[in-house]
Amino acid sequence: YVFDLLSLNAKDTTSLPLIERKVLLKKLIRKNPIIKYSDHIIGNGKEFYAVAEKQDLEGIMAKKADSVYFPGVRTGDWLKIKQHHSDEVIITGFTEPTGSRKYFGALVLATKKGNQLKYAGHTGTGFNDKMIKEIYEKLKPLIRPTSVFTERVKTNTAVTWVEPKYIAEIKFTEWTSDGKMRHPVFLRMREDKKLKDIQMATITKSKTLDKTKSKVKSKKVNQEDDVENDDPNEKDVIIGKNKVHLTNQHKIYWPDEKITKGMMIDYYQQVADYILPYLKDRPESLKRNPSGINGIAFYHKDAGDDAPSWVKSKKIFSDSVNKDIDYIICNDKATLAYLNNLGCIELNPWNSTTKALDKPDYMIIDIDPAPKNTFEQVIETANVVKAILDKAGASSYCKTSGATGLHIFVPMQKKYDYETVKNFAHIICVMANEQLPSFTSIERNLKKRGSKIYLDFLQNRRGQTISSVYSLRPRAGATVSTPLLWKEVKSGLSPSMFTIETILPRLKKMKDIFSPVLGKGIDLQKCLAKLQ
């Protein structure tokens, strides 16, 4: 399904209004058995949304008919309007309060199937102090000594069970396959509803992360066990032999996509087997976004005293601050979850490991465009760099940055020191710049280089970091730094194609195509001889 046209017969159409671009698009596609024109509805937005809601679709897109197209830029001219689910469930108990909260911690919820009640999860969010007190006063006379469920419900603190009388309306993202609400939030009491009005919810298989999660379940299910917590916004998980305390699980990290911190942590646990080889034994320079992609970000290098005892670290002297820095080393899933919980949306490992800090495992050329460069120019630059490396006999591997550029890696296998690797990268960048002088530069200063792509060879210095392969990026769309086959690095490629929702199906199909980066290194002397 094609919904927009950005160029026609090599002529840019992005400055035309959307409605005109679509007229051209419809004429171009005509009747095609494979490629379909994605039509639209003008006006009637509420009615159109109601149809999407009725069909249980994710939502609708709203677009300004006269909007022009800005490549690589998210604007307010296109809006994703998602469907929010809510349902009525039965209150069957409450847990003890923790911290400063009074009366209760969370409500225990149920759905009804025939005469049987089925546990549907619990929620400790959506209340204010007044509501908590009012609900507690309603439930207190209904306290009973035993659970209403035939199944065992696990919680960290004791549950006070109540007779199933009151109904609550709960907002949630989706039903899980085992009949529990994901990310439930209390909306209101429904005292107009009776127990007989509540039926078992229709459980459909999750359409987003939960669906993807099931695809890799065999790798994860026996390694991580949830420990129920009174507040579903927080939980303790046992990963391997370590308990990780996760906080603010419902905090929205990507507002447009409605992706929460908890979903982000889930993603990293699902790709852990793929990303950990690229993090293992490498000092981590932590970039933290604790309030999501639109909040303040800051770098955090020193592990400090707050890290759990099982988190490994390595003291490394830093010339820039004239002291030892205690870098965290991420070798396992528990540490990965701990870093994500700190707000580390992206992972930034060193190019070298603690086994040979001065000898990187690979060389990196970062193709970094200025705001006015097109991604087509980035693609052309990457292919020129590859051609030079091919001539040198140096194997190379490409990945998206997850932002606006591309990263090209060349395996070095700890054979050479940083200075030697940097000098080789410099030679490659100079040669590429000579072929593409009109829109590339090796000048780092943005003012001096102007609107040109920066061929960054300085990433090959001790302590420099770059976003890891399979790392999320704190950008709109929840993009992922993704390895590419060189045949994919061609016109039409876009970093926005690779996101938190698309990467796992790709991994299942293609496996880890980036692994040679950690394999046999090149012979620099032979490569230089071929380039002379």
Image: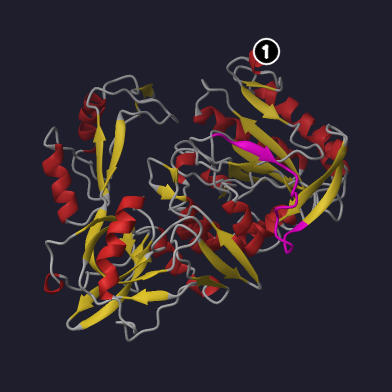
In this view, the residue in front, 221 or 406, is: 221
Is residue 44 rendered to the left or right of residue 387?
left
Q: Position of residue 438 (x, y in %)?
A: 60, 17
Q: Residue furthest bottom?
A: 150
Characterize the local packing of mark 1: few (<14), some (14-19) or many (20 or more) Cα atoms within 10 angstroms.
few
Is residue 425 rendered to the left or right of residue 92?
right
Q: Looking at the rendering, which quadrant does residue 36 occupy?
A: top left
Q: Establish if 228 lies above or below 378.
A: below
Q: Position of residue 411 (x, y in %)?
A: 75, 49
Is 46 part of what is drawn in magenta? no
Q: The magenta stretch spans which residues?
A: 296-312
Q: Establish if 531 lies above or below 204.
A: above
Quadrant assignment for the N terminus: top left
Quadrant assignment for the C terminus: top right
In this view, the residue in front, 351 or 28, is: 351
Residue 520 visible in this rendered orientation of the protein? no
Which element is circle 1 on? Answer: helix
Residue depicted at 58% across the width and 52% down the height: 340
Colour scheme of the rendered structure: secondary structure
Q: Position of residue 400 (x, y in %)?
A: 57, 42
Q: Looking at the rendering, which quadrant does residue 241 occupy?
A: bottom right
Q: Establish if 446 lies above or below 25.
A: above
Is 306 part of what is drawn in magenta? yes
Magenta-drawn stretch, dominant element (helix, strand or loop): loop
Q: Position of residue 39 (x, y in %)?
A: 19, 39
In this view, the residue in front, 36 or 160, is: 160
The residue wearing badge 1 is 448
- For badge 1, the amino acid type reads Lys
Q: Looking at the rendering, which quadrant does residue 118 occupy?
A: bottom left
Residue 430 visible in this rendered orientation of the protein? yes
